[in-house]
Amino acid sequence: MNLQNITYRTNVEAGDAKIIRDMVISTGFFNEEEIDIAEDLARQRFEEGSSSGYEFIFAEFEGRTISYSCFGIIPGTQSSYDLYWIATHNDFRGHGIGKLVLLETEKAIKKLGGTGIYVETASREQYIPTRAFYANNNYILKAQYEDYYSPGDDLCVFVKRI
């Protein structure tokens, strides 16, 4: 796969909610409620535009959306952003696409005046690669809340200053 052939877009189109649903399901990481939330955020952005508070970056390869991120300013802050979602379709994982989308997201946040990015993820064993992904991209684990998602599944908060 030639990563130079990946293109990016930020506009949310009518079919993106379903594309995101299929992409998030393909990862095998998320439960039904989380899948519904990912889909709903795209629908909200499509219907409400920028007033939704959600921004998106989509990575496309040969006409297919293969990865995306969803982020937004944290209400009540001056320049702190939440990275709500970043996912790559399972058929395309392992090629560095997630890193490229993360870099595009960081550039977009910086352009919007952002100075910090906050990411929440789980502590379950399944999420070891996810936590390593953030650590490898210079995000620092700043907080861990025990039993947040469920007994034995902590909330891990990573932060990167940009």
Image (cartoon, rainbow, N blue to C red):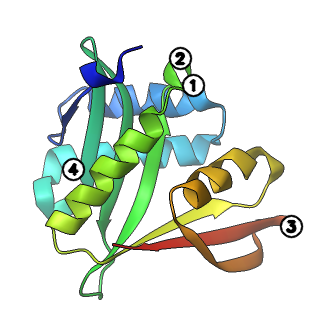
Q: Is residue 94 left or right of residue 144?
A: left
Could you tell which of marks 4 and 3 lies nearer the N-terminus?
A: 4
Could you tell which of marks 2 and 4 lies nearer the N-terminus?
A: 4
Label 2 Cα neighbours within 10 Å, binned few <14 / some 14-19 / many ≥20: few
The residue pinned by badge 3 equals 151
Q: Position of residue 103 (x, y in %)?
A: 34, 50
Q: Amino acid at mark 1?
A: Ser
Separation of marks 1 and 3 at Cα, in angstroms: 26 Å
Quadrant hosting residue 150 = bottom right
Disc number lying in front (1 or 4): 1
Could you tell which of marks 1 and 3 lies nearer the N-terminus?
A: 1
Could you tell which of marks 1 and 4 lies nearer the N-terminus?
A: 1
Residue drawn 15% across the image and 68% down it: 112
- Confirm or deny contact between disc 1 and disc 2 (CB under 8 A): yes
Residue drawn 16% across the image and 47% down it: 47
Q: Which mark is residue 42?
A: none
Q: Which mark is residue 26?
A: 1
